Image (cartoon, grey):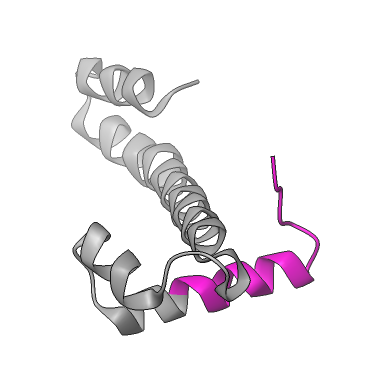
Amino acid sequence: MTLESEMRKAEAMSDPLRRALFVEGELIPLVEQTRARILELRAKAVYDAWNEGNGMVYRDIAKALGVSKPLVQQMIAYARQLRESKEFDTE
């Protein structure tokens, strides 16, 4: 089940109420799960680039990604939380 296939399924529904219920009950939760996973992947990648202070510096990561330095710091902090909770996959 991919997000794209579920969206096509919703678009093909002729009953608008059924379609709205499907979007609310199926698509939105799937998007939220996907977004959470994407944010985890980004945080882990930034953490790996930073390499516990032995890799890139915050400023350079921020510049490369086109984001603020505080956002990079937040991503690294989030990756640390994931690591501490043993959800950190280093592969």
Q: Depth check: 51 or 28 in front?
A: 51
The percent position of residue 85, horizontal first and vertical second, equals 78, 68
Residue 79 in which image quadrant: bottom right
50 shown above or below 81: above
Q: Residue furthest bottom?
A: 70
Q: Position of residue 61 (x, y in %)?
A: 34, 65
Q: Give the residue drawn at x 44%, y 79%.
A: 74
Answer left or right for 10 relative to 46.
left
Vertical comparison of 28 with 74: above or below: above
* Residue at the spot 46% in from the left edge and 60% down from the top edge: 46
Q: Is residue 70 above or below residue 9?
A: below
Q: Residue at x 27, y 31 (%)?
A: 19
| Magenta stretch encompasses residue 77 | yes
The answer to whether 34 appears left or right of 68 in the picture is right
User: In the picture provided, is 43 more to the left or to the right than 35?
Assistant: right
Q: How many marks?
A: 0
| Magenta stretch bounds | 75-91
Q: Residue at x 44, y 38 (%)?
A: 26
Quarter of the image where the C terminus is located? top right
* Snapshot quadrant of residue 47: bottom right
Residue 26 lies, with reference to residue 87, above or below; the image says above
Taking depth in this image into account, of 23 and 55 the one nearest to the observer is: 55
Of all residues, the one furthest to the right in this rendering is: 86
Residue 38, horizontal then vertical, whole percent:
44, 49
Q: Position of residue 81 (x, y in %)?
A: 67, 74
Q: Is residue 63 magenta?
A: no
